[in-house]
Image (tube, grey):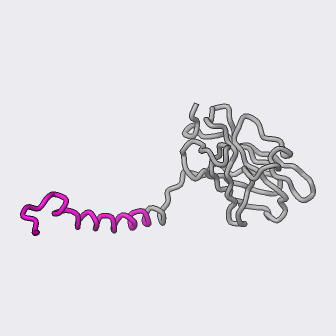
Amino acid sequence: MAQRSSTWWQRNKFCLSGLILILPFIFLYQSMNPKFPDAWGEKTVGEFKITPMPFNMDPPYSHHDEYVKDFLLMFGEGDIKNIRQAYFSLGEAPHKLSKLALDEEGILHGSRHGQHVHAIAPPAISAKDKAWLIIETWQGDVLTQSWDIPQALVTL
């Protein structure tokens, strides 16, 4: 039997289905045009000149039962082939290399164009915390460098 009066749903379901088809293009545009925060200052660590950049200004998040924050480390000088292992973390003091080597969190990975890292971080970043980079070369030298954390990332 034919319906005599149309309801709001009957009149507008076609428009709503069109909106659902448009939404993926909005998300595609956003993913193709990301907005990153400013990079931190470049510092020298041994033969390397390194500039860290956080992916966002959000607080650390839980990843495999550990709090981490994503960073990109750009190498201006130095050959990354000379690095045996390198770790990036946030905290009051750098973690010991022997402790860091037991887990995959905090280790740099990527290419010569940029190294990505899930930096080990406390659940809340305080003003006393710093960003620590620890590099071990193939010759066994351990190099350490720190960056002050911008006030915008401090959550305590």
Residue 94 percent location from the top left of the image = 78, 40
* In the foreground, 109 or 80: 109
Residue 12 in the figure: left or right of residue 44: left
Residue 43 percent location from the top left of the image = 73, 50
* In the foreground, 130 or 123: 123
Residue 113 in the figure: left or right of residue 139: left
- In the rendered structure, which segment of residues is drawn in magenta? 1-29
Q: Measuring 61% from the left and 35% from the top, which residue is drawn there? A: 124
Residue 98 in the figure: left or right of residue 120: right
Residue 75 percent location from the top left of the image = 72, 60
Q: Measuring 16% from the left and 57% from the top, which residue is drawn there? A: 8
**Number of marks drawn:** 0
The vertical placement of 82 against 40, above or below, is below
User: In which quarter of the view is residue 137 placed?
Assistant: bottom right
User: In which quarter of the view is residue 48 placed?
Assistant: bottom right
The vertical placement of 98 against 114, above or below, is above
